[in-house]
């Protein structure tokens, strides 16, 4: 059972130790997927969220593209993205029918809108790494036929991909009898007390055996994660009414931006990238950027103006190596001590075990790819907590280990 106290009580005051409770912090795609993965395994989850509803931050867009941009040479990043895409599509295929739909695996066309991208796509096809079930090359005529509107560009067609409505999907995931949601609870501090964790919000204290932090770039505010190289990247999406006489799309189209087929009579397209501007107000100039990218890919959208668009901004959480941070937290001070030799020999301490903050997990840093990386990361954390078979190979688990940046910075003598 999960225990909640009033504030100011000593977190360690003779309380029974909970054995099978989990607190998930954050109700975006990462938190909702983690809560659901645990609940599906019979675990009672309490989800704490600072906002008054799920998916109010990065995961709040009306629609997002579900697709992987695969590298020409197989990389760990590509492997994670492909596995993540397949994992997400398998989950989405099991969704009950709903109106409006939560997702549609209607295919994704990745257009070659620049010479660089055209070359990359040719190399990818020549390399023959991926089967036709993953991607198919199409010329501009075939691309136009699949889209349902003219495009001047050739591209790659991903048949088993599509779009998801992330905000509605988060609400769906949290609707489970084993998940209790507590909104307006901003987590400010975590303390370890024996085998359990105490979670302090601005008004209450909670305790559980395991805590999973899914608060995107806000995770840095918690002392256990203050060393992580994560930062928010602002993005704006634009929404446009889909008129009967206007273009109707059959697939998601990605070029310099992306657009999905209309949902509830609205197209959602975007999105901008801004590392330095942090205001959440929508800007006309950003709508214009989205419109320019859209009209370049599908000329039937030429003539739209920013005043035709509604929009929304959100913040992606990006990491220094563009891979998410998923797994059990490292004990920062002990890791520095135990791996100190790395400052002089980057290859030393190969067999040394990373000291962990037992029971404290993190699932953040999903950048622009949360729809394909959050669900598989959530499944990994649920498997770690429940000691089940992991959905990812060891090499990939190491690549997304939240401890990796401590080891990297020691080798670079930054810490
Ligand atoms: C404009 C834009 C377009 C995008 N397009 C796509 C796309 O097409 N395809 C794709 O795959 N991905 C896309 N993404 C990325 C994707 O949306 C993210 O990767 C994903 O939403 C990340 O989810 P998250 O749960 O990690 O973060 P968030 O959704 O930001 O969730 C974090 C949650 O933690 C809560 N929180 C923060 N601090 C605290 C605290 N102290 N206590 C309690 N709660 C707290 C927040 O309120 C929030 O609800 C896009 C992102 C943006 C911004």
Image: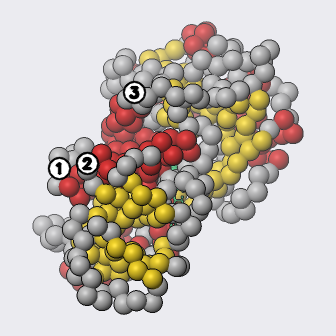
Say whether marks 3 and 1 touch (CB < 8 Å). no
Q: CA distance from mark 2 to mark 1?
A: 10 Å
Percent position (x, y) of residue 76?
32, 45
* Up/down of 412 relative to 122, above or below: below
Residue 376 vs residue 275: left or right? left
For image coordinates 52% across by 33% down, the residue present is 102
Answer with mark 2 or mark 3, whichever residue precedes in sequence. 2
Mark 2 crowd level (few <14, some 14–19, many ≥20, 10 Å Cα): few
Indicate the quadrant where residue 352 lies: bottom left
Q: Position of residue 358 (x, y in %)?
A: 24, 72
Q: Is residue 153 above or below residue 47?
A: above
Residue that mark 2 sits on:
41
Quadrant of the snapshot with the C terminus: bottom left
* Residue pictured at 69% horizontal, 17% vertical: 248
Whether disc 2's CB lies below 8 Å from ligand 1 is answered no
Disc number placed over residue 91 in the picture, else none: none
Q: According to the image, label 3 marks what residue?
A: 93
**In this figure, which residue is indicated by the disc labeled 1?**
388
Q: Nearer the viewer, residue 63 or 254?
A: 63
Question: Residue at (65%, 43%) from the top-left corner?
Answer: 271
Label 3 near ligand 1 (CB < 8 Å): no
Distance from the alpha carbon under mark 2 to that under mark 3: 19 Å
Tell me where residue 244 appears, x and y as whole percent: 77, 16
């Amino acid at each position: 059972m999960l225990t909640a106290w009033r504030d100011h009580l000593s977190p360690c005051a003779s309380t029974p130790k909970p054995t099978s409770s989990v607190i998930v912090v954050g109700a975006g795609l990462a938190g909702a997927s983690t809560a659901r993965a645990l609940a599906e395994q019979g675990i009672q989850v309490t989800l704490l969220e600072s906002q008054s509803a799920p998916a109010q931050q990065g995961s709040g867009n009306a629609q997002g593209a579900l697709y992987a941009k695969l590298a020409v040479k197989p990389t760990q990043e590509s492997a994670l993205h492909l596995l993540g895409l397949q994992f997400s599509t398998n989950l989405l295929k099991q969704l009950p029918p709903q109106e409006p739909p939560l997702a549609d695996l209607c295919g994704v066309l990745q257009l070659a809108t620049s010479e660089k991208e055209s070359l990359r796509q040719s190399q990818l096809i020549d390399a023959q790494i991926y089967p036709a079930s993953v991607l198919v090359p199409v010329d501009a005529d075939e691309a136009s036929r699949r889209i349902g509107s003219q495009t001047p560009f050739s591209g790659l067609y991903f048949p088993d991909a599509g779009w998801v409505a992330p905000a509605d999907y988060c609400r769906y995931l949290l609707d489970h009898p084993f998940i209790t949601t507590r909104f307006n609870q901003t987590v400010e501090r975590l303390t370890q007390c024996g085998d359990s964790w105490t979670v302090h919000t601005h008004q209450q204290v909670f305790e559980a055996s395991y805590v999973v932090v899914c608060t995107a770039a806000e995770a840095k505010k918690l002392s256990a994660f203050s060393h992580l190289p994560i930062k928010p990247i602002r993005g704006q999406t634009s929404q446009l009414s889909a008129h009967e006489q206007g273009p109707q799309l059959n697939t998601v189209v990605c070029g310099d931006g992306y657009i999905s087929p209309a949902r509830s009579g609205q197209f959602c397209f975007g999105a901008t990238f801004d590392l330095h501007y942090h205001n959440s107000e929508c800007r006309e100039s950003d709508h214009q950027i989205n419109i320019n990218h859209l009209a370049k890919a599908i000329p039937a959208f030429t003539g739209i103006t920013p005043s035709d668009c509604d929009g929304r901004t959100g913040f992606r959480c990006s990491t220094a190596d563009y891979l998410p941070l998923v797994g059990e937290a490292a004990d920062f001070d002990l890791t520095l001590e135990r791996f100190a030799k790395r400052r002089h020999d980057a290859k030393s301490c190969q067999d040394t075990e990373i000291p962990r903050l037992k029971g404290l997990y993190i699932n953040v840093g999903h950048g622009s790819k949360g729809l394909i990386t959050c669900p598989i990361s959530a499944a990994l954390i649920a498997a770690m907590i429940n000691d089940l078979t992991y959905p990812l190979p060891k090499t990939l688990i190491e690549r997304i280990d939240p401890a990796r940046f401590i080891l990297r910075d020691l080798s670079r003598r930054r810490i």
